[in-house]
Each structure stands twice: as C-alpha cells, then as structure tokens.
Image: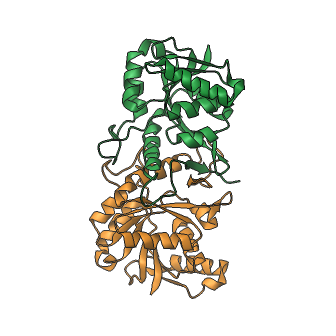
Chain colours: A green, B orange
Amino acid sequence: MNDITIIGTGSMARSIAVRALAGGRSVQLLAHDDKGKADKLAAELSGADKTSTGRISTGIVGDGITGAIVIGAVPFDAAKMLVTEHRGALGGKVYVDITNPVDASTFEGLAVPHDTSAAEELQKTTDARVVKAFNTTFAGPLVQGEVAGQPLDVLIAGDDDEAVRAVADLVRAGGLTPIVVGPLRRARQLEQAGFLHMLLQANEGLPEFQWDTALRIVRAE
Amino acid sequence: MNDITIIGTGSMARSIAVRALAGGRSVQLLAHDDKGKADKLAAELSGADKTSTGRISTGIVGDGITGAIVIGAVPFDAAKMLVTEHRGALGGKVYVDITNPVDASTFEGLAVPHDTSAAEELQKTTDARVVKAFNTTFAGPLVQGEVAGQPLDVLIAGDDDEAVRAVADLVRAGGLTPIVVGPLRRARQLEQAGFLHMLLQANEGLPEFQWDTALRIVRAE
C-alpha cells in the first residue's frame, strides 16, 4: 500500500513525486505503457535522496493502484481516457486533477465550456472523489518547493471535505502551503488563473518569466 | 492639467490616489454628484502628506476631465453608464477599468458573458483607450503599497501600447510592480483571477484572509 499513486512520468509527475517523498510519503509511479520510464524516474528520485529507496514502487497503468490518492500527471485528454477506462480501479480513491485544459489550437482560451471545468468534467466520468490542485504551479519551482525563498501556494478545490483534507495534508507535508479555495466548481477560476500564469511565461514582453515563477496569495504578516 | 483623474470617492479611489500622489503625480478627484465627498477625500489625502497640497483638485462627474489617464473607481454598471454618457469628454484619454463584474445575485461567477470581459464591454462603448488594471489588488494593501514587505503586483492588459505604458509608468511611480499580461482580451483571465481572489476573503475556511492579501506572480531571484 502506497500513500500516493502518480500516473505519468513527465516533469509534473517528477516534481510532485519529489514533494511527496520530501514529505515522507511512499509513491507508486505508473507509466502509461513503458514501465522502463517509471523505473528510470524512480532510480533518479532514489539517487537524489537515498532515503527514498524502498518508498517508491513502479508499474504501468492497468496495474493495481496502491495509493489512496491518485494524481493524474497527464494532459486533460489523457486524464479523461484514464478515468473512464479505469473507472473500477479508481472507485473510492481521491483523484487529483492537475490539468490546464488550454485550447492548443489557439492558445487563447480553455477547451472546456465556460460553465464547467476540466475537474468537473472528470468528476462526471468517475466515482473517485476529484480534487483540483497543482494546476497553478510549474514543475521547476515544485521541485525546489519555493520561489525566491517563498514556499509555493497550492490552490485546492473539491467537493469532498475528506478528500480535500487529504490533498492539503500531502501539500503541507511536502513543505508547501495549501489554500483551499472552495468547491470543485472553483476549478473554473483556478483553470483561468493557471492559464493566465502560463501565458505570462517565455513571451516577448516578459523575458524574465521562464516557467520559474509562482502564483501566490501573499498574506499579511 | 492633471496627470490622473479618478472618478469615485470610495476605498479604491482613495487607495489609487494615495499611490499616484506617492509617485509624485497630480490628481483630479471627481465625485459622482456630491463635490463635498471629493473635497473631503482631498483634505484627507493632503492631511496625510502635506506635500500633496496643490496636487489635488476636485469636482464632480461632468466637469472637465483634466487627467490624461482616467481611472473609473466605480462598479462595472456605473462604469458602463459613465463611459457612455461622457463619451466625448473621454475621447483620446486612457481609461483604466478596475472592475470585477461579479454576479451579485449568486456570487458564483461573472455577470459578463464568457467570451468577453468588463474591460472589453467598456471598450465597445468608448473612444478612450481602455486598459485593465488594479482589479486584483484590494484597497487596504494598495494604500500600504505592499503586503508582508512585498510590493504589490499590478496586472495590466490593453491593446494600445502607449496607453499600457502610461499605466505601467503610473504603477511603477507609485512603488508597485507592473506586469503587462497582454491584450485587452486577457482581462477575461484577470477578471476570473480577481474574482477568485475576492472569493478567498473573509470566508469560513480562510478566516486569516481579510481583504488584506496580495495576488502576486513571484519571480525567481
């Protein structure tokens, strides 16, 4: 039994695994179809922190999901297929949706209708309790856990209090600051904010923003 | 001739006036219909910083607009009437839209359609060059210029480069950090982000957020 199952082997999968391991959690890494990719990432994560050895297991999608919290570190379209095809295996789990469903044809808006969100669309097709999180944080800062000495904020939305609390605990254990913004439909605002944060990166007008910034709600001291 | 004309005498009018005066700008304060309110605010602002005396003039809407930049520190519905009724007087000016057009009946979303924004709606009815700014900053932090020692970010969107630059210069002069996010249609994302920031205030789950936080894009050092 692992605490966390991460599906995907890309930069977001890696960075969330780093935070989970930093928080003392055990992690199951599931590659889409090539277990070698998960093994490679696991070796890298163990290499960086030998204490992690034994707390990482690997597999491919379709293997038994051992985590109580499942993080779909894949794009929205892949996440839709994932929660549909593995409906049974995800039943009763907490499923964390990290996606920003940007319309890739225009990069002008989101590819979900305005009266819903990626997270809500996933919830329609799964019995897992969907929680939105990590969609406003970039992979590089997540690995570090901070930007400019400030721990990252992780904005969280969900309808199930227990599921939201479990994700907030994971975030806090990893040295980050959970901010619970409200019910799952607040993902509509989180996805717009995540999209805005993405739009600011590596563009002509803001050459200093290189996917290394943090969207934060700074509180008074 | 003033640098800035601020329409309204509420907390946002006051806080933007404080920043403009801190930046050495002169300010025309226009009350909606009661010049006494503008005079009162002007006296207060001069009292706080005697060097401001002589750099504040007052009047009511309908008086000649002396500022090159006009800031509508009023709710969206009032702003719509304003730019429509004073179309001639605003011609050629830079008009700053600070509104968050929250649907007040539900507080669940924005009262503008999803494929537009308050700023774009105002642009349709005015010859002024509309710039979105100050919709993600609250009045209290603006008066201070910072939260937790961090200067506020002011996210700016607009289609006219010269107008955007003029607003960015005003923001910078006032000790804040301008971040130009793109064309005016980016106001769609800014208004969702502003709405999200508002939703986090004074709610049951986040008692420590009391309209005193700052939405920031923290950059790497």
Relative height, residue A53 to residue A190 (above, below): above
Can you give x and y, in whole percent of width and height, for residue A109 in the image? 34, 46
Q: Quadrant of the C terminus of chain B?
A: bottom right
Relative height, residue B165 to residue A180 (above, below): below
Figure label count: 0
Relative height, residue B77 to residue B52 (above, below): above
Can you give x and y, in whole percent of width and height, for residue B220 in the image? 60, 53
User: Do we see residue A141 in this rendering?
Assistant: yes
Relative height, residue A182 to residue B10 (above, below): above
| Residue A97 located left or right of residue B43 | left
Can you give x and y, in whole percent of width and height, for residue A212 in the image? 55, 48
| Residue B218 located left or right of residue B163 | right
User: Do we see residue B107 in this rendering?
Assistant: no
Give the camera-side residue of B217 and B4.
B217
Give the camera-side residue of A151 and A165.
A151
The answer to which image quadrant residue A178 occupies is: top right
Q: Residue at x 34, y 46 (%)?
A: A107
Q: Residue at x 31, y 77 (%)?
A: B91
Can you give x and y, in whole percent of width and height, for residue B199 in the image? 52, 46
Give the camera-side residue of A153 and A46.
A46
Q: Residue at x 58, y 54 (%)?
A: B219
Q: Quadrant of the N terminus of chain B?
A: bottom left
